[in-house]
Amino acid sequence: MSDAVLAQALGICSALLLLSAVLLVWRRAQVTALPLLALQGLALAGLVAVIAISEGSLELLGVALLVLLFKSIVIPLALARAGRGEYGGAPLINTATSLIAVAALTALAYAISAPLAVLGTGPAIQAIPVGIALVLYGFLLLVTGRHAIAQLIGFLVIDNGTATVAFLSSGGVPIIVELGVFLDVLLVILILYVLTGRIRDEYGYADLDDLTELHD
Amino acid sequence: MIAAGLLAQAGLMAAAVVLAAVVPARYRARAAGPAIAGIGVAGAVTGLLALGGSQGVVEMPVALPIGPLLLSPTALGGFFMLVIGIVGAIAAVYAIGYVHGPSASRSSWMALAVFLASMQLVAAAADVVSFLLFWELMAVASTALVLTEHAQRATVRPAAIWYAGMTQVSFFLLLAGFGILAAQAGSTQFTALAVTAGDSTEANVAFVCLVLGFAAKAGVVPLHVWLPRAHPEAPSHVSALMSAAMVKLGVYGVILVVTRFLVGGATWWGLLILGLGLVSAVYGILQASVASDLKRLLAYSTTENVGLMLLAIGSAVLLRSNGTTGVADVALAACLLLVMAHAAFKTTLFLGAGSILRATGERDLDRLGGLGSRMPLTAAAFGIGALGAAALPLTVGFVAEWVLLQALIHGASASDRILAIVMPLTVGAVALTAGLALMTFVKAYGIAFLARPRSQGAEQARESPLTMRMAMAAAAMLVIALGLAPGLAARAVADAAGLVGIGSTGLLGIDLPAVGALLDPAWLAILAAALAVPVLMVSLRYARRRPRREVDLAWGCGGVRVSPRMQYTATSYAEPLARIFDDSLRPERDVIVTHSSEARYLVERIQYRQRLSDVFETRLYLPAIGLVDRMTTAGRRLQNGKIHFYLAYSFIAFLVVLVVVTL
């Protein structure tokens, strides 16, 4: 494939990542959130695959497969089981405000990644702000999400953002490091999965807003 | 030898802790007490060796990148170790008979061992880290000891909180001060710290931090607020240790600062120390003279004595910067003699107070009385201690104050304008202090031991067990022995600080060549006896010849004082004084008159209540604490337990950092 096609593919994947994240902030129902998360995983996997092809690295292609498996299949399915259909009330700020916040955060992401331009001039470096924007959106989701699952999604978006930046800026990481990160995230998901279940069993709901005091 | 002594102290501490932990309750005091006394003896011997000029180092390597911890007592450290060791040994022997209830518990004995050993090792520390390490260990152990009786009285807990708070303030100030010095010197060892220049801003800040930090531990006004609370609430042997030994380490610190780390600074350095000492001495004894709680009285008297020590150090610094080194030496010697004297008589007094408390269950002087005949040995020991505290001749207290006054009076003749103003004022303040101290201890002794018992507890008092009597007798002997033969003390003091302005004439006398004065208490005693004995014998013979007379109360209508309630109490004795110093003491007085139900002109009962609070506490600390309280209450709104807020805080902080980095 030619460089132009690869650059186009990279652009599409980055755009998909950003779009899925914006949609995640906009539509907070679980019905839409989990497919969007899967889409984001798919876009990330595509991004890694494009980088793998452009560098001709088989190892990175394996990483792309792993990303596809975990980020777009295993984790969304696990979340769907953990949430059991309920997703709590509306987020703490309304949709219009969140979209304005998203716009501001995107601008901020581009502003703060200006120093990273020194890394190079290729399309991959140009796309780094997308990863940073993803981290900021994830944080926003974490802050405004009412339900434990919603917060978990925010956490995963942060993770996707970090991974995006890592892949774009360094041209991929060794598979062993990537495996370690996956296992880490999986462990967090497992812990939160169990914790959410316990919170619901104990209190009958998993709305974090009502949990304000410590008990023995 | 020194190293062996230091290791012996640590080993004995470990042994005492283990004994306190494993020996069953019945034999615990008899096992742990002697072991702790052993720590004291080991400390005293090591201190004596160091004072004699022996050198020795114990190095403890640590994992942190700060160099090994060094223990190597100097002559000055040895002097303090000697004083602390003797006090500790006496207090430990006393504790064997004294402890009961919670003070006989495992934790209390263990804390006592750690407390004593860490105090002695503070005096041996030769680098900043080990100094602060043992300083904190000492603070923690003593806080645990203050808390001993927290289940018995509600007042113990606030006392311990005040103590812990002020101790931490002191620690932070010391940390800051030592930090500046160590950064300047590039090393944490004491031998390297002395290179800091005398007049830089860093030196000034370090000086203020260190002096205030040590002053807080020494109980100097206005950082004394923990002292009148913690001393009365701790068990009496602990009060004795805290007051006679621990507080002295604050004085040790100030001496270290002015003679080793920051030598020869600005004039205001001397004036600051002298001013702190002056205010403490006068305010302390004023509060003591109107206090009616016996242990509170003794605690305030500690503030007074520490004030005198600081006053001596301050005038030494002033005199030295003026070039009159000889007189400055005498002032510093006076400080060390005061340390020794105060350790001796305050141990006696606190142990005596503990004996009273144990026998009667009372600390309030207004409810004591008539203990002289019931507890003869306690009465004799307390009396000797009181004589020492009032600085009367033939006690060590007199020797110390005499040397102090010599230095102050001869310092005043210097041509320097500041000295010419400050020294006479200081002499006046010391004189006022001495007068009030005399009155205070006349009150303490007279009300507690003379007249008739004012409560049932005092009526049924019994003399204390043997170990307590032994300890009190030993402490009282020290007061007299050092007072009669101060030559040895003078030589120890001269060795401790390398002073040339003080010497001794044999074992018995003190010679101050710098001011041309000589004190020989033994000859004074013989002279006094030679005068008094003939007068006494003649008057006795003369009295025998006269017929026996009956003396009755004038206008007593043939009656006698029938009720103990007609006697002077501690409050009524000090009442005129409380009126004179009304403005600085601000006592609250209530007079409640209950009229007879039949006629308004007949009074059935009059109640008089007087509450004395500490002006510094009510005017300075409580407003400050209230302010902090309000601020933290406002701060709690930030910390509301909602996870979204916490996440938002970190998100906002993250954004701010990003924006700042971009700009």
Image (cartoon, coloured by chain):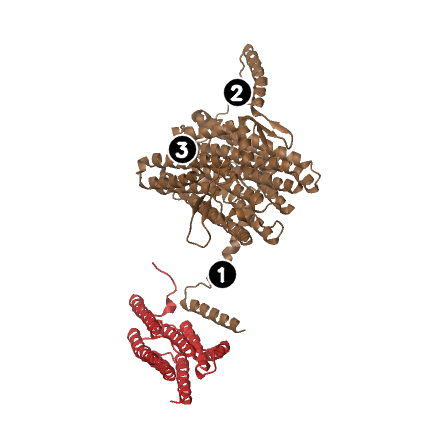
Chain colours: A red, B brown
Q: A66 or B311: which is nearer to us?
A: A66
Q: Amino acid at mark 3?
A: Val
Q: Secondary structure at mark 3?
A: helix
Q: Secondary structure at mark 1?
A: helix
Res. B558 mark: 2
Res. B131 mark: none
Q: B9 or B377: which is nearer to us?
A: B9
Q: B442 or B142: which is nearer to us?
A: B142
Q: Amino acid at mark 1?
A: Ala
Taking A214 as reference, is B279 above or below it?
Answer: above
As measured in the structure, the alpha-carbon distance from the residue carrying label 1 to the one carrying label 2 is 70 Å
The residue labelled by disc 3 is B93
The residue labelled by disc 1 is B634
Q: Earlier in the sequence, mark 1 or mark 2?
A: 2
Q: Residue at x 60, y 31 (%)?
A: B402
Q: Secondary structure at mark 2?
A: loop
As measured in the structure, the alpha-carbon distance from the residue carrying label 3 to the one carrying label 1 is 51 Å
Q: Earlier in the sequence, mark 3 or mark 2?
A: 3
Residue B648: x and y in percent read 44, 69
Residue B503: x and y in percent read 58, 31
As measured in the structure, the alpha-carbon distance from the residue carrying label 3 to the one carrying label 2 is 51 Å
Front label number (3 vs 1)? 3
The reply to whether the C-beta atoms of the residues labelled 3 and 2 are less than 8 Å apart is no
Q: Earlier in the sequence, mark 3 or mark 1?
A: 3
Tag 1, which chain? B
Tag 2, which chain? B
The reply to whether the C-beta atoms of the residues labelled 1 and 2 are less than 8 Å apart is no
Q: Do callouts 1 and 2 point to residues on the same chain? A: yes
| Left or right side of B225 for B265 | right
